[in-house]
């Protein structure tokens, strides 16, 4: 089964929509430069509205490991997603502070990028075309990827069935592909989830 992550949720109505759709994961963005960024207090308010079986992922860019561990310990998030220049030493330090799962994001432009991702010490990797670029990379590059990965970058209700059928990723991750005018579009969220679930049954 392909797992689903709906990322960049920021409003109570987004939580209601997610609860109805039952993705495996939702994402809170804590990178301050992102237009989807939420404060820790806001994230906690939203987390309280989230169904307990849906895991909350926190997206960070080069935050001190101690800061991330505090988010995990407070229960705001269940999983960490690293989107900066964090390296193996950083991940090792984070593992000293928490035993929660870690996702490390990689920008994929060449086969070498995929090889580098495969060597990550994180529990999972996320393969993207860039930092929230909203465009897809050449999926042929990840055909041989063995490490469990989240496929991101340019996914939408229209193309995600093709991605699932061709690659069978551990999970698919979407943000801009379920938005209209910069806000989460609940009809698009529903269409995305339905597209993945339908393809999984084929």
Image: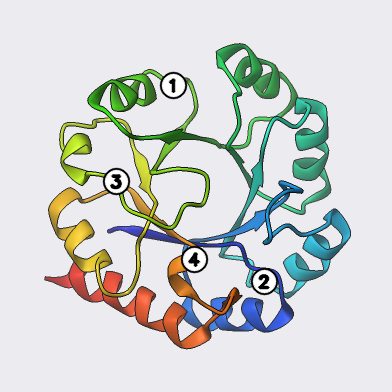
For label 3, the residue is 137
Mark 3 or 1, nearer chain start: 1
Q: Quadrant of the C terminus?
A: bottom left
Identity of the residue drawn at 61% across and 21% down: 91
Asked if marks 2 and 3 touch (Cβ < 8 Å), the reply is no
User: Which is closer to the viewer, label 2 or label 3?
Assistant: 3
User: Which is closer to the viewer, label 4 or label 1?
Assistant: 4
User: Which is closer to the viewer, label 2 or label 4?
Assistant: 4
Please determine whether, in this image, residue 82 is positioned above or below residue 59.
Answer: above
Mark 4 or 3, nearer chain start: 3
Q: Quadrant of residue 71?
A: top right
Asked if marks 4 and 3 touch (Cβ < 8 Å), the reply is no
Query: Which percent across, then down, holds residue 162?
Result: 17, 63
For label 2, the residue is 50
Query: Which percent across, then down, holds residue 22?
Result: 48, 74
Mark 1 or 2, nearer chain start: 2
For label 1, the residue is 120
Please determine whether, in this image, residue 10 is positioned above or below residue 71.
Answer: below
Query: Which percent across, then down, holds residue 155?
Result: 35, 62
């Amino acid at each position: 089964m392909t797992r689903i992550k709906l990322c960049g949720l920021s409003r109570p109505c987004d939580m209601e929509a997610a609860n109805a759709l039952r993705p495996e994961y939702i994402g809170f963005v804590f990178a301050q430069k992102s237009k989807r960024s939420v404060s820790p207090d806001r994230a906690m308010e939203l987390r309280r509205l989230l169904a307990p079986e849906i895991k909350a992922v926190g997206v960070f860019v080069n935050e001190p490991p101690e800061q991330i561990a505090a988010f995990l310990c407070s229960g705001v998030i269940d999983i960490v997603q690293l989107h900066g220049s964090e390296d193996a030493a950083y991940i090792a330090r984070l593992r000293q502070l928490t035993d929660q799962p870690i996702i490390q994001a990689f920008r994929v432009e060449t086969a070498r990028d995929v090889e580098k991702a495969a060597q990550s010490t994180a529990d999972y990797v996320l393969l993207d075309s860039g930092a929230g670029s909203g465009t897809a990379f050449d999926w042929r590059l990840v055909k041989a990827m063995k490490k469990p990965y989240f496929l991101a970058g340019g996914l939408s209700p229209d193309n995600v069935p093709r991605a699932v059928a061709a690659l069978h990723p551990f999970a698919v991750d979407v943000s801009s592909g379920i938005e209209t005018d910069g806000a989460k579009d609940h009809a698009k969220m529903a269409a995305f989830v339905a597209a993945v679930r339908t393809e999984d049954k084929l």
